[in-house]
Amino acid sequence: MDKTLKFKWTLIVVIIGVCIWLFWPPQEKLNFGLDLKGGTHMILEVDTTGIDQKDVSGVVDGTRRVLKNRIDPEGIRELEIRSYDNRIFIQIPDIKDIDKVRSRIHQTALLEFCLVNNNPEDIKKARSGENVPGYRLATFMESEAKDSERDEEDILIKSEPELTGKYLAKAKSVFGGSFNEPMVGFEFDSEGSRRFALVTKENKGERLAILLDGLVISAPVIKDVIHKEGVIKGSMTVERAKEIALLLTSGALPAPVEIISETTVSPTLGADSIRKGIYAAVYGLIAVVMFMALYYLLAGFIADFALLLNLVILIGVLAFFDATITLPGIAGIILTIGMSVDANVLIFERIREEQKAGKKIKTAISHGYNRAFRTILDANLTTLLTALILYWKGTGPIKGFGVTLSVGIATSMFTALFVTRAVFDSLTSSLKMENLKMLQFFSEPKIPFLSFRKLAYIFSIVLIAGGLFVFFIRGDEKYGIDFTGGTVVQVKFDEKIKIEDLRDMLKKVGLGKSTIQYFGIDKTTVIIKTSMQQVNAVQDVIKENLKEKSFSVERVEQIGPAIGKELRTSALVAFTLAILGILLYITWRFEFRFAIAAIIALVHDVLVTAGAVAVLGYFTGREINLPVIAALLTIIGYSLNDTIVVFDRIREDLKLMKQESYENIINISINQTLSRTLLTSLTTLFVVLCLYLFGGVVINGFAFTLLIGIIIGTYSSIFIASPLLFEWQKKLSTK
């Protein structure tokens, strides 16, 4: 073994060893997203109306700090909270009481001490709607405990408070009073102590209302001068006293906030997603490994070896960068299994051609790698471009898919070009291998593909027209809440539940028009979708009416209309950027006519696939959501991969077959790459089919879209992109 080969194997062994060390044991080293381990992801928008632009950053940052103290006062959660522009992003793993978190977020926690007006005439005027100068009516806070002392619903208080929570130093829940009831003890700072002492001294015998966020907690009579410390007592439970103390300690929010997006996944559903994702990956891996070994024989085993190493390196790189592995991210890993053998297929088919031309095995392998390199580079770079756009413009779990797909493309190129070459060089130098046997579906096909182009045009136009017709007549119904806004609640029951019963319950809270459908085949899990942001209403009505049935809320998604519109715009921008990037790249690497033909084929693939999703969604309830958009963008990269392989061969044959007509050259080029096109589509279909069948219902729509797209992308490379090149040349030759 020469020094170069020894260096290659040393490098390979070191890389594999480091990668295994980076991710083993996986349960400790890998960072799983909230959709896999359970938890809540929220996006909050801070209302900065009326705030000077130079102060916005400080207000948002202050709001972020207050919210962190409210949600995690002990600092023991793995809480991630960050801000960008006027938005705050919160991730809370494995949370059990999300309702409490929502309550803490929405409360402003503005504490006020206001003197009470006990004049019966003024109270009567205020309650009748008349204006009482300097005063306002305030309502008592609803109590969780029975209040036998209070017989009034509202009181008249001064409009301007005597004191606010601005001067509060600390607050805590305590017990006291005649019956040792729960209360909130508080302590003012020095300035607050001075002011409070003055107020209580000058108003002995008067009532002083204590308000939280405009609601009266209590309104005791001032009996003595109070300096630094005091208590807030009312009819409250121990939990409520602790909650009020927490809100007061964390401070008032500098500005109001609104939850514009929320996703909550139970740990049970996350564990189920991991399990099904692993099943899908294993089944897909087995299918690809067996196929490659059976078809390419020894070369197939070498490709399988490279594929396994690719997975090891991919997971190691993800662990090194502490990348978050999400459910779409697992889908990206599974998709990489199918796509990573693409480069090997290109190389093996080139080696086959070189052997047929009478080249010795070493020369055939060397020429095979060299001639396949340019095609592999072009095909993978265009797919990488769409993966990077997915990461850049995607949100939440879709970023995870973009990361795994990007890393997977890079690692697959390393294993296909570097690792397999090292194996072949070792075999030819040490074992004196003289021939590389492989099976072959098509020996020398001579199908006149261009003669079918008009039929293909008609077929495609019918598919696109039919799909677009259904797409537009379905209106916003075809979109998931990612784009329209609304609420989705996934509920798992221990036994079968009737949809009609759930609908009757939801009618009681004005949600009778909600979309309700089974999720899975056992009819124990249902999805409830409403156009309104009514998470609590949906959960409360189920709890109230189904007390005798055991159930759990597995997933909650809530998207505000504003962010839904933004996501739709972001998806459109991503498509536009992908198309422009591909147009520029192919124009640079090929010619402008090649770029235009490829772009038309890509648009064709997206329109047909989106139309198919819309048509089948009409019968099955499938929706166009963010995972479907991710699948469509992936199809752009994958379909272009096929097209580039054909185009690269056309470009090569144009130089070699100068005496042949343009039509014959294109037909010959398609036939020469037909075996590779069908084989790579087949291996990718294997893994996507496994993802569709075994990956679980959460990722089902993503896999379904990919299935359609792969089939259409393979068809368009042969029957749309290549014929369009011929039509262009035909027009040029007639001028």
Image (cartoon, rainbow, N blue to C red):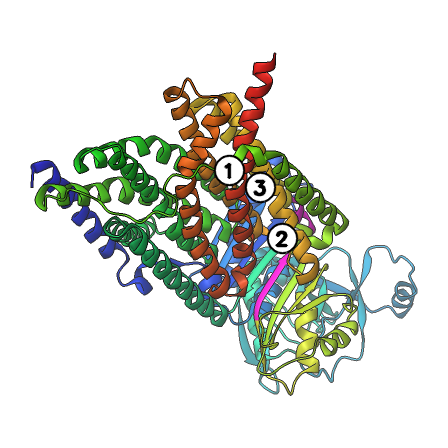
Disc 3 crowd, CA 10 A, few/some/many (<14, 14-19, 20+): many
Q: Position of residue 500 (x, y in %)?
A: 74, 76
Q: Amino acid at mark 1?
A: Ser
Q: Which mark is residue 717?
A: 1
Judging by the rendered image, the residue that carries numbered circle 3 is 605
Secondary structure state at the residue bearing disc 3: helix
Image quadrant containing the N terminus: top left
Quick one: label 3 or label 1, which is nearer the N terminus? 3
Secondary structure state at the residue bearing disc 2: helix
Q: Amino acid at mark 3?
A: Asp
Q: Quadrant of residue 557?
A: bottom right
| Left or right position of 1 against 620 | left
Disc 1 crowd, CA 10 A, few/some/many (<14, 14-19, 20+): many
Q: Amino acid at mark 2?
A: Asp
Mark 3 and mark 1: Cα distance apart in space: 10 Å
| Left or right position of 410 against 538 | left
The residue segment tinted magenta is 554-566
Q: Position of residue 456 (x, y in %)?
A: 61, 39
Answer whether labels 1 and 2 touch (C-beta < 8 Å). no
Quick one: label 2 or label 3, which is nearer the N terminus? 2
Judging by the rendered image, the residue that carries numbered circle 2 is 482
- Whether residue 472 is visible: yes
Mark 1 and mark 2: Cα distance apart in space: 32 Å
